[in-house]
Image (cartoon, rainbow, N blue to C red):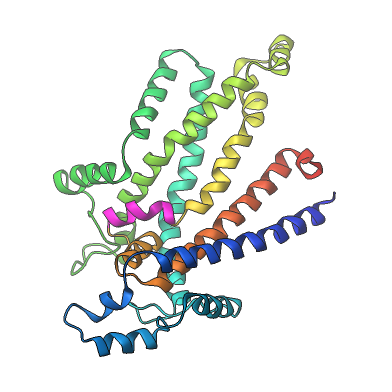
Amino acid sequence: MDFAKYIARRVLQMIPVIIAVTIFNFLIINFAPGDPVTVLAGENATQEYMDELREAYGLNEPILVRLKLYMQKLLKGDLGVSYTYRQPVANIIKEKMKVTLMLVLLSEIATIVVGTALGALAARHEGKTLDNIISNVSMMLYCMPVYWLGMLLILFFAVKLQWLPSSGMYSFGSQKYSKSVDLIRHLILPSLTLFLVRLPTYIKLTRSTVVEVAQEDYINSARAIGYSEKDVYKKHALPNALLPTVTVAGMSLSTVFSGALLTETVFSWPGMGRMIFDGVASRDYPIIMGGFLVTTILVVVGSLITDLIYMYLDPRVVHS
């Protein structure tokens, strides 16, 4: 099977998956407890006003009729209008996506690079002091809940030392820093939180795969030929141990937005995760379904990107 046919087949496989998950998300969200009209209307609203809201937002129609209308709008690229923002969901997601990408991509790239390097370093010194230090620190970080770690960083860097702001994207009423510098200062703590939370995954995965690969016959042959331990690990063991890491890195694209929910909530970062959280709290169905649709697309796209990287590292994948 050639490259073009393989890509075409994978893309065609993605379409029914996205459709099925979209329908499932719609049904789950609409069958969930809670009434968005009650949230929108307020506690003292009359029944007549609530009925008007239901009719205005199409919530008085049977669920299958609403599903049909929703799917028809999706085919036209219309994600609906948010109940709370009173704006098209597509426009809201576009703005929130930029903010979340700013936060997550920075931390994810740093995590992949540093985590892979530390994992390989620990594997090279397996059973020694350096390996024990890296493994124990990564285990400690792995056991920390993201919200707790975020609050610890706020307590230390924002409250005690007062080096960095504790929340938001920009400071209000302060001209001490330029806008870009102010943004970077607000970005440090949430990015550091995501970095520390994700770091143990790559350390543990890389270490275990490199240790396993290092026992293979071709690695022992490289040693017997006379290669130094550094070259053995750098040129032979590590490249062949990267496939599991590539899988995790590729699939992490699916959690770029939803995975940052707790971090964005702790630091009041106005991104996709916080948008979905607020949408759930206010029963804003279009916002929730739009956020889940983006996450669904990212899952299948992440899977495709992972396959493409696999093909680059191991061309035999195309023929499997």
Q: Is residue 150 left or right of residue 66?
A: left
In the figure, residue 89 lies in which quadrant?
bottom left
Main SS of residues in magenta: helix
Q: Residue furthest left?
A: 160
Q: Residue furthest front?
A: 62
Residue located 18% across and 44% down the image? 155
Q: Residue furthest top?
A: 224
Residue located 42% across and 60% down the image? 100
In the figure, residue 174 lies in which quadrant?
bottom left
Q: Who is closer to the viewer here, 250 or 102?
A: 250
Q: Who is closer to the viewer here, 287 or 27?
A: 27
| Residue 203 drawn at (x, y percent) | 47, 31
Residue located 55% across and 41% down the image? 248
Q: Is residue 245 magenta?
A: no
Residue 156 seen in the figure: yes
Q: Who is closer to the viewer here, 35 or 186?
A: 35
297 up-or-down from 77: above or below: above
In the figure, residue 91 lies in which quadrant?
bottom left
Residue 96 seen in the figure: no
Give the quarter of the figure containing the C terminus: top right
Q: Who is closer to the viewer here, 61 or 118?
A: 61
| Residue 96 drawn at (x, y percent) | 41, 67
Q: Is residue 109 left or right of residue 39?
A: right
Picture mark count? 0
Residue located 73% across and 13% down the image? 221
| Residue 150 drawn at (x, y percent) | 27, 46
Q: Is residue 310 left or right of residue 230?
A: right
Q: Is residue 264 magenta?
A: yes
- For the record, the magenta segment spans 258-267
| Residue 280 drawn at (x, y percent) | 34, 64
